[in-house]
Amino acid sequence: MTSRIPRDSRLRLVRPRPLAAAPQAMNQRRPRRPAPRPPEGTPARSELAGMARSGLADAARVARWADSALGPGRGSATADGKATLSDATAAHAARELGLPVAKVRADWDTARLAGLVEVHGGTARPGWRLRAWNRDDSAVLRGWVALFDAWSLAHPEPAGHEPGAVAEVVSAMPQVLSFLQLSAGPVPVAQLLDLLEQRVTELRTERCEVPYGPRLEPGTPGAEPDPAPATDTALAPLLDWALHALAAVGALTCGDGQATLTPLGSWAVWVKLEQICVAAQSPAGNIEQSAEGMLRGCGRLRPNAARAEYRAWLAARPVGSAVAELLGAA
């Protein structure tokens, strides 16, 4: 017979505790934030890479020619060591490629800005993007974005304009491009000119220094005049230059008094906006620090916070200079 009296089991070695107090599984991980998706209607990366390859086909052709014809012991690329194609090399490339010398020089500059060719002293060598050009869509898109960032260098401003005004327009164009991206369609150039005027006026106001000592009211004798607003007549030709320079690199199209971002241009502006958002997520505020200061600041953070910190630090800087600074700190 078995007893109906409950007995205490001697196999229970630990006290029962609530489920909430149980340790979590070691392999449990925090869910990652889903990767941001580009705006609806953006072509796939493979299609975008195909557009970039098509737009940079001439530059890649010149870069491949430089790979085979230039290099140590085979010829010099530049005469001054500043990446300017020498006359002899330009003429040599024009003969072999069947192109005008001016076209060769333009394609050479595009290849340099896109990272398809690298110049070291008087010699040239292919960039890593050229090696991966046919198989790596990311390398192609990075090369095109590098050219997009350097649009003002790819097509210098026309003569006769003050360098300060040109610099203001270059600094204000990201806001103009963001407006084009948000509009998702053609925008009248007159509207872009008004936006550019407002942004340039803001830049000029931000640069004004607060004078020491008492400040006189505007209109009184001896008072400093307020910053002059940007005028349409001064900015119109510079906006025209900027739009045509961006059109030349494939970022937008101009016609009938309107401007429209291309799929590549819209995607690139979206990428830049996402980088700004990532940079704004700096939890410890080390984004303005040097590489060494950022690394030392991350040493006091938990792993997830440290990862967010150095990702924000990298997103706020050009890749080349950021890597060089990190190597220097190391």
Image (cartoon, helix red, strand yellow):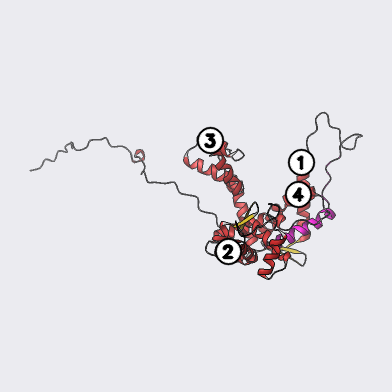
- Magenta-drawn stretch contains 246: yes
Q: CA distance from mark 3 to mark 1?
A: 32 Å
**Drawn side of residue 123 relative to residue 166, left or right:** left
Where disc 2 sits, the SS reads helix
Residue picked out by circle 3 = 296
The residue pinned by badge 4 equals: 167
Residue holding disc 1: 207
Quick one: label 4, few (<14), some, or many (20+) residues within 10 Å? few
Query: Which region is colored magenta?
Result: 225-249
Determine the CA span between mark 2 and mark 4: 30 Å
Q: Amino acid at mark 2?
A: Ala
- Marks 2 and 4 in Cβ contact (< 8 Å): no
Closer to the eye: label 1 or 2: 2
Magenta stretch, main secondary structure, is helix
Identify which amino acid the numbered label 4 is placed on: Ala
Please provide percent x and percent y for residue 16.
28, 37
**Residue 36 image position (x, y, % from top left):** 55, 54
Q: Which residue is mark 2?
A: 49
Instruction: Pick the residue in front: 245 or 227.
Output: 245
Residue at 81 percent across and 57 percent down: it is 237
Residue 183 in sight: no
N-terminal of the pair, mark 1 or mark 2, is: 2
Q: Give me the C-alpha separation between circle 4 and circle 1.
A: 13 Å
Q: Secondary structure at mark 3?
A: helix
- Which residue is most to the bottom? 98
Q: Which mark sits nearer the N-terminus, 4 or 1?
A: 4
Q: Decide whether residue 253 is among the magenta residues.
A: no
Residue farthest along the left direction in this orientation: 1
| 275 relative to 206, above or below | below
